[in-house]
């Protein structure tokens, strides 16, 4: 599912499928998986010892974790686990993103018990990886939702409560840009800054209380853009986008996440995010999510 026509790092589902060199998951509107059976596919399954080859030859006896390697099946095919293939794709990606996010929560409990530099550097890596798991989750499930036309039975795929798209809020200097591949950004769009400083702001209208504010931004490697978050005009957080990610593009590779826990919010509060570009890095924003 990675960008095999580029840096082999960020998510790009389409690149692994329609590139002119081969196919990796062989998905279409009806189903997914490579047919490697002897009867109707590449014959790969026949290379094993007889008893193993017999098991892999039939979709009914192939273990769930290897099914799509050996067989092309409908999205509605029911696995030995009892789930359909499409629901398993949805569930596994949401479970994986939740696990990565939980690492951040667990690490935050160690603040004050570990030296500050070690704590902050590990936290930054865990937040980045949590953010990447979320990017991959959203990209993969949205691609398969569009391709299959089958909704997530739990209503998660394509639905993002609390998410505010950067291109839909009031902006100063920021301009909307299309992201390629489209699934690498929420809604396929982001906002980019071409002047010395830009801002995006919106008014919170949710339930009062302490919330987690999540800022999805892009950290390109051709500069070190600066970001600042303000709540009702008061500084809340700031950081420099200076990671060493292998891209100068606004895409799934540069997509990063800043998590602000325990922010007290009430209806009418204004959240403002300022971005200051540096060299070719455009302090681009994808969305803000309030949990």
Image: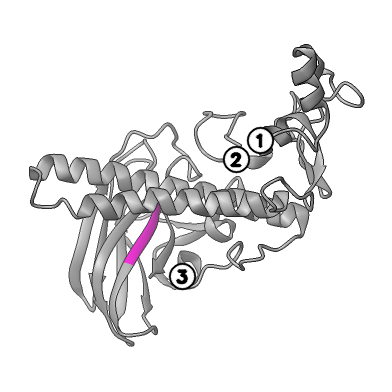
Nearer to us in this view, 61 or 218: 61
- In the drawing, what numbered circle is on residue 12? 2
State yes or no: residue 266 in magenta: no
Q: Earlier in the sequence, mark 3 or mark 1?
A: 1
The type of colouring in the image is: one colour
Q: Where 249 falls versus 47 (above or below)?
A: below
Q: What is the CA distance from the residue labelled 3 to the residue labelled 1?
A: 28 Å
- Relative image position of residue 117 (x, y in whole percent): 11, 41
Q: What is the CA distance from the residue labelled 2 to the residue labelled 1?
A: 5 Å
Q: Is residue 111 visible?
A: yes
| Badge 1: residue crowd in 10 Å (few <14, some 14–19, many ≥20) | some
Residue at label 1?
15
Badge 2 element: loop
Q: Where 262 falls versus 148 (above or below)?
A: below
Q: Give the residues drawn in magenta, as a range.
A: 213-218
- Relative image position of residue 18 (x, y in whole percent): 74, 35
Nearer to us in this view, 233 or 90: 90
Residue at label 3?
164
- Residue at position x 52%, y 28% in the image: 7
Outermost bottom residue: 267
Badge 3 element: strand
Residue 153 is left or right of residue 113, and the answer is right
Q: Are marks 3 and 1 in contact (CB under 8 Å)?
A: no
Q: Are marks 2 and 1 in contact (CB under 8 Å)?
A: yes
């Amino acid at each position: 599912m990675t960008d095999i026509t580029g840096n082999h790092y960020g998510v790009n589902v389409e690149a692994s499928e329609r590139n002119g060199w081969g196919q990796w998951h062989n998905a279409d509107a009806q189903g997914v998986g490579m047919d490697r059976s002897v009867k109707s596919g590449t014959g790969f399954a026949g290379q094993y010892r007889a008893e193993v080859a017999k098991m892999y030859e039939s979709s009914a006896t192939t273990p769930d974790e290897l099914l799509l390697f050996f067989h092309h099946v409908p999205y509605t095919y029911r696995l030995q686990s009892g789930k359909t293939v499409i629901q398993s794709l949805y569930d596994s990606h949401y479970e994986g993103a939740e696990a990565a996010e939980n690492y951040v929560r667990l690490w935050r409990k160690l603040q004050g018990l570990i030296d500050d530099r070690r704590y902050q550097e590990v936290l930054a890596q865990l937040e980045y990886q949590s953010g990447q798991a979320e990017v991959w989750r959203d990209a993969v499930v949205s691609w398969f939702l569009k391709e299959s036309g089958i909704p997530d039975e739990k209503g998660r795929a394509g639905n993002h409560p609390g998410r505010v798209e950067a291109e839909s809020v009031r902006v100063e200097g920021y301009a909307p840009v299309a992201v390629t591949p489209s699934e690498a950004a929420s809604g396929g769009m982001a906002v980019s800054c071409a002047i010395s400083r830009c801002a995006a702001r919106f008014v919170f209208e949710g339930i009062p209380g302490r919330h987690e504010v999540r800022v999805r931004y892009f950290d390109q490697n051709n500069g070190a853009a600066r970001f600042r978050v303000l709540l009702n005009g008061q500084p809340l957080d700031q950081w420099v986008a200076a990671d060493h990610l292998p891209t100068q593009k606004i895409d799934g590779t540069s997509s990063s996440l800043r998590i602000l826990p325990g922010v007290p919010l009430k209806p009418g509060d204004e959240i403002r995010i300022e971005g200051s570009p540096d060299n070719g890095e455009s302090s681009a924003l994808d969305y803000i999510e309030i949990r």
